[in-house]
Image (cartoon, grey):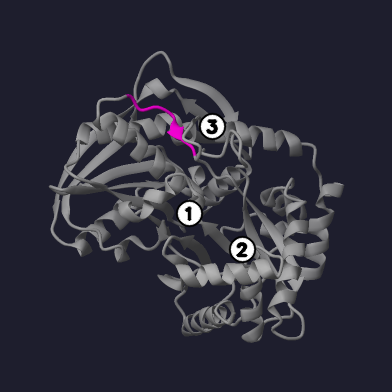
Amino acid sequence: MLQISVEDSGIGPGEVHRWHLVALTGDGGPVARRMAGYNQVKHFAVADRAQSMNEPIRSYVAATFDLVGPVDLDALREALLHLVRRHEVLRTVYQPLGGDLSCEIIGADEIALKHVEAGTLETPEEVGAHLHRAFQEVDTLSWPLIAMGAVVRDDSATVWFSCDHLVTDGLSSAIAVNDIVGAYRALSTGEAAGPAVGPAADPVEAGSYLEFSRSQRRTNQAMNAEDARLDYWRAFIDRNGGLFPRFPLDLGVEPGRLYPPVAATERLLTSREVEAFEAVCRAHGGRLSMGLLAAQAIALRGQGGPRTYRGLVPVNERGRGAYAQSMGWFINTLPIEFRTGDGPDFGEALAAAQRAYAESRSHAGVHFVEAWRLLAPAEYARLNFWPHAVNFFSYIDFRRMPGAEHHRAQRARMHVWVSGCNGILHWLHRTDDGLHVNTIHVDTPQAGAANRALLDGFTRIVTAG
């Protein structure tokens, strides 16, 4: 699954179809009322505050994939409906409540899809522009939080969906593609759409993200600023000079300002080159992901960054149990720091990165949003975006996701967009074709030059053998 801007995806033209999610009236109504997760509470509050200040910040997490052959629109509608019924987070209505966020779940039988034909697009450029606009229709503050549709041709269709970050993360995109494709295959042959199929070819139910969030919040409900569980975070803040580790290169940005984003995706390594680098990491007793982190730290050092790498790392909290194939925002963000040494010794940096990551993961019971609330200065409580360019490392191996063996044939793509940014974000991701990076950075000459130098340095390190 490649992460790329939808305008750069080269999706073929065709007839435009939309399916709008609607709630049915009836006696059933919402089946439960719960409190939202940490990420959701923060995200909603930021969106609400930004809108009240007439400074809305827009974003989406979307995906596209192809179905080959003449498309059964009825089966596709039912497959999309199956997705929303399977994941209750997609049929949940959110409301602010006393500084928190409550949510009401609409029953699986209380929703439907309204089909709309929206004309024909003639060129790939028109398709890209149309989808980019359609993806932006999702809004944190209003329901529904998912939009769905397809561009249909005589011999194929490109199916798409777009979600607000409130109900999804990057891994959710691959999970949703697998769910839709599996349901469509069954429905188009006259079978019923059942649970998704896991790696062992066994049906897998989707655990509730809202139940996960409730359990997580119960675990931390008594936490205060003096809690010993925050010692790791306090120590990091003391050494770092704050909760948010700064991106250490000059990007030519002014404090407190968002800039138009520049987005691009490129392949850094072929599949064989990734395998070769992975073998190097194993020879040093490390994992590929930590080797990539060490290489990033060395590359930053080579561009004038510090010997001690400090950054934030997103961590998937699904585990391998009930939530392994669930949609939601199952991400915690952890601080990490390690020294790269006085020279570009990759083995030394890899070992340091592995030790640091293990230490960081041991403190994953504390959620980043709670650490932010309890430990950050008061003026950070109402930030609408990070206070400055933040050092951030992200890596996903999409080959490990359900349905990954079909991603290449399906032209499965994930599309992440933000309306403004104040730094550089690199999303490293591995596919059957190699290692790719999706970059979003501020539109300044300094940021463009720093990004190019950093990626070139990173590539030299991981191909040095």
Is residue 196 on the magenta stretch?
yes
Q: Earlier in the sequence, mark 2 or mark 3?
A: 3
Badges 3 and 1: C-beta atoms under 8 Å apart?
A: no
The three-letter code of the residue at mark 2 reads Ser
Q: Give the distance between the C-alpha atoms of the residues marked 2 and 1, in whole angstroms.
A: 14 Å
Q: Which residue is mark 2?
A: 289
Q: Is residue 75 left or right of residue 377?
A: left
Name, please, the residue furthest toward the top.
27
Quadrant occupied by the N terminus: bottom left
SS at mark 1 in the image: helix
Residue 81, labelled with which disc?
none
SS at mark 2 in the image: helix
Residue appearing at x 81%, y 57% in the figure: 232
Local crowd at mark 2 within 10 Å, few (<14), some, or many (≥20)? Answer: some
The three-letter code of the residue at mark 3 reads Cys
Is 138 or 289 nearer to us in this picture?
289
Magenta-colored span: 192-198
Residue 103, labelled with which disc?
3
